[in-house]
Amino acid sequence: MSAISSAFFNRQFYKIFAIGLIIIFFIIPIIRLIAMSFLSDEGINFDYYYAILTDGRTWQVLQNTLIVVVGSTIISLILGTAFAWMVAYTDIRMKGIVQLFIFLPFIIPSYITSLAWVQFFGPAGLLTKLLESVSINLPSWDLYSMSGIIFVMGISHFPLVYLFTVNVFRKIPREMELAARISGATRWTAFSKIVFPMALPGVVGGSFIAFLGGLDNFGIPAFLGTPANISVLSTYIYQKVIGFGPSAFNEAAVLSVILGVIAIIGISLQWLLLRKSKPIETTKLDYSPRYHLGKKKLIAEILIWLFFATTSIFPFISMVMTSFLNAYGLDFVPENFSLKNYAYILSRNSTVESILTSLKLAGVTTVIGIIVGTIFSYYRVRKPNLNMKLMEYGITIPYALPGMVLALAMIFAWMEPIPGWNPGIYGSAAILYIAYVTRFLTLQVRSGITAFQQVDKEVEEAARINGTNGFGKWKRIMIPLIAPGVLSGAMLVFLSALTELTVSSLLYSSNAETIGVAILSFQQSGYTLYSTAFSSLIVGLIIVVYFLLFTSGALRKRKVEKGK
Amino acid sequence: MKKLLILLFAALLSVLTACGNSSDEEAGASGGEGESELSGELEFYTSQPDVDAEQLVDAFNEKYPDVDVNIFRSGTEEVISKLNAESQAGSVVADVLLLADSVTFEGLKEADMLMEYNSPEAEAIPEEFVDADGTYTGTKVMATGIVINTDEVTEAPTSWDALVSDEGSDQVVVPSPLYSGAAAYNLGIFTRSDGFGWDFYEGIKANNPMITEGNGAVIENVASGQKNYGMIVDYLVARAASDGSPVELIYPKEGVPVITEPIGITADTEEAEIAKAFVDFVLSAEGQALQAEIGYTPIREGVEAPDGLKSLDEIKTLSAPTDELYQNREADKGQFDELFSN
């Protein structure tokens, strides 16, 4: 009896402890932010809300934001699902490399992609000149526009949808579709009635993250929207924050609350969509192709590589070529090339230090994310009560807020957590760890939820009934089942944290400069060539690591097969 | 389940304690009799490029090896936001600030965030660049001029008219005052100068200009030949031209707005002696020579400007009362936003 009650007591204790952690790390900074939107010198009031909501500019900005975010999410959704389907089901070749190129738009800094495209598509760009030489005069596409922002953002975020969807596709038993086909359904019916609904948790989860990413994204609308004077919430908040005057923060806080409300509407929509999705009983990822494209394979492959050529290969090459230039704006001819930009950045201690700092930050964030995020998503799926839902809101909002706002909220919350007591967290690297975990945990949670939603509760119960105890159940049944989903989430967290920019740029201390901060400060101070060299170096390193993992994985697989 | 939770708790705890430790290193006691015996930690918040700030700190450390200077570098606007957040949250961490323009410092002064310090070195600096109350002092001279692409523009313009005339149609790039502090300063100056006013900006708008976040993007667009004319701070052009970019800097004959990257000490500083020594060093003949070496026009009389830039006495400046600029900055930005979004 006492054993049971102490177990019960422990349970309660852990539960309270976990809720406490989430409140301290996630909810308090948000509450400070909300408080700021109400508090003025005259106490609590709605003055700031009144000022913001009666300003016509706000509504224009909101309209822009919705168009941009919804439009880009749709592009990400279509591209992400299409690529996931092709990689999971068809027999196209070089899937490992295809996967790498799918990730590149997510890793290459978006201002570099935008710049490369502006140079490529612009009036004096390569494409226009090429077409002119064969006397085709296309009206050149102005990327500095609403459509430009939507397009670039859609391309940058489609890897999120891909990553959430691809393993879900692989898990769907091929028999389901076969059965449908045998009963006379067309391919399209089979896809839209059977496969797609089963893949919904992944598709919706990924699209939701792309939606949040679009809400908080500052770089793309700032770079492409400023020339055309298009403001979205994130850039408008920035403009408010940097303004003088006593109400700068308060008005920014009001706008952030509005942004948070949009994010909450997004989560609720997602819950509605997923209400009816069913778990899948299979436990294995099925890697073998289901569709043999035959003659169409070549066409599909050409299309895929053309797509990569414009979205990632071309921008990447243009970045690398620029990074070898002696001075910006010189022609790309051999005598203008040298290694001096690389020599410079590599000669600085801070370069290596910033790489190490970012690796450490990303590593720790990923590990904490895997543990906390997976546990949370398990309970969120198995015990979807109001508490858990509210906590999910709390975990999600920091990802949707613009980095600048989250960073300011962090300063408010951690400088003196209790007035008069400064624990020294702000000003040390600890604030960065806290900020990173807070910001990126939702990526892990989302992929955890997607993974658990596909594990039927009966599988878990069967394991328990068979006498497998708690730990064994996890080790032998649950972990192998959820591992692919959890690991793709972890990869997202790691890559996002590695190249994080806006939060760190306000919170770093000089002993903890991150990669993003180093690149941004080169860029901001007019040392474009150093920033392209550094970016090329980082993207290059990521590619090399990927290839090492990929080839070692392939080798191991071959060995295993030989061993059979 | 329990094990996982314990693991999670341990992981969190170890991260927090590991990070906490590094920050708790005691700052050494400041003071001492001789100048060179200063020791301790100094928090230096600046908008200067990293590279330049590091050179400055290295030179300072040659003189004061026991002072540990921590640099926080970001755009002026971000630094100000961080300072405001720190001040609202309890206490300002920064000791010394070196930011874009006097208007920014006027704002800090208004909020009582600056300490009064009349550096003996400031006597060699033109009076107009030193705050009368001693809260901030200019450290260099940065003029905003016109940059042209020399491959595309054969006849170099001599006047600001280049940005509003027909040859500038679709060929002009200017930084946005909504993002860049220097651009906001220029906006304040131009709209209050004879012969310019809002007409000048309306003229630019009529040329369908490209508006960029900052000055860095202006040099990129002009150097790469996307645009032929740009409004820009001088040193970026001098630097790009000396590297070989096809660009040239023009100081228009009507005069140029000038920002001075002032330096000041925060009111909350706990390291006043070190902060003063740092300010003295930046303003000293030695510190000013270093600025010129890095590529800026020094502000101190008698120190030569680097190649490609004009010295202070060769520049005709456009100016307006700092206080007026400060009071009207938000209104100016609002009017700019309205003008260009229609």
Image (tube, coloured by chain):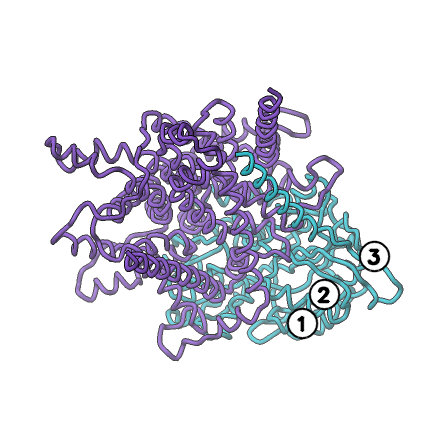
Chain colours: A purple, B cyan
Q: Name the residue beneath numbered marker 3.
A: B29
- Which of the two discs, 1 and 2, labels the residue nearer the N terminus? 2
Q: Position of residue A500 (x, y in %)?
A: 50, 51
Quarter-of-image position of residue B59? bottom right
Quarter-of-image position of residue A447? top left
Q: Position of residue B210 (x, y in %)?
A: 41, 54
Which amino acid, by three-letter code, is at mark 2?
Val
B190 vs A72, left or right, is right
Residue found 42% across the figure and 29% down from its top? A464
- Element assignment for label 3: loop
A352 vs B88, left or right, is left
Any part of residue A467 in sight: yes
Q: Position of residue B58 (x, y in %)?
A: 68, 68
Q: Tell me the mark number nearer the camera, choosing from 3 and 2.
A: 3
Tell which of A516 and B118 is nearer to you.
Answer: A516
- Which of the two discs, 1 and 3, labels the residue nearer the N terminus? 3
Position of the N terminus of chain A, as image quadrant, is top right
**Residue B332 position (above or below residue A458):** below
